[in-house]
Amino acid sequence: MQRYLIWKSGPGPLQVEFRRVGEAILRPSLQIVTPTGSDPLPRQDDCDVARFSLSDGDVERVLAARGGLRPPCLMLQCDAFLGLACDQRRWGWSIRVSREGEALPCYDLDGTALPLRRDGFTRAQLQRIPERSGMARSHQIIGLS
């Protein structure tokens, strides 16, 4: 799984959508991380999709000081829990960053465009919850340009 993704967003408000893949129960969180600290963004749940809204000011904070040693970014953290009826231990997610309903292009760290599904979500890469455990955790760093 690629840990660092870059979306070509430019200024203006954005929505980050997080879609569950697999049987596990997911608990995602998104925060703006800067050299001076971090600020969590409120989550809005809608079935298997969690949405996070970034205001114009939030996006500007992430875009600021891009050339610095530790540029601001978005940190997506996710905990996965096995439900009682889970037969498989696979879990993962897909992400879409959009503005006014239009999905924005995504790139990996070396500048290669990542293929997106028709609905604009990234392709999910499934992980496994370890044996003898009922939970797992992962993260992804999102940069804006």
Image (cartoon, helix red, strand yellow):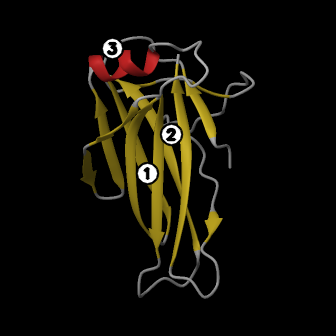
Residue drawn at 59 percent across, 51 percent down:
124
Q: How dense is the environment of label 2, judged by Cα within 10 Å: few (below 14), some, or many (20 and up)?
A: many
Which mark sits nearer the N-terminus, 2 or 1? Answer: 1
Dot 1: what SS? strand
What is the quadrant of residue 89 in the picture? bottom right
Residue drawn at 50 percent across, 13 percent down:
65
Which mark sits nearer the N-terminus, 1 or 3? Answer: 3
Q: Residue beneath label 2, please?
A: 121
Q: Check whether the beta carbons of the residues at disc 2 and disc 1 lie within 8 A of each other.
A: yes
Q: Check whether the beta carbons of the residues at disc 2 and disc 3 lie within 8 A of each other.
A: no
Taking 76 as reference, is 67 above or below it? above
* 54 to the left or right of 66: left
Dot 3: what SS? loop
Q: Position of residue 119 (x, y in %)?
A: 47, 37
Q: Nearer the viewer, residue 67 or 10?
A: 67
Residue drawn at 64 percent across, 64 percent down:
127
Q: Residue beneath label 1, please?
A: 19
- How far apart in space, not on screen, are marks 2 and 3 (Cα)? 20 Å
Which mark sits nearer the N-terminus, 2 or 3? Answer: 3
Give the label on residue 114, or none: none
Give the label on residue 12, or none: 3
What is the quadrant of residue 3 in the picture? top right
Dot 2: what SS? loop
Residue drawn at 41 percent across, 87 percent down:
84
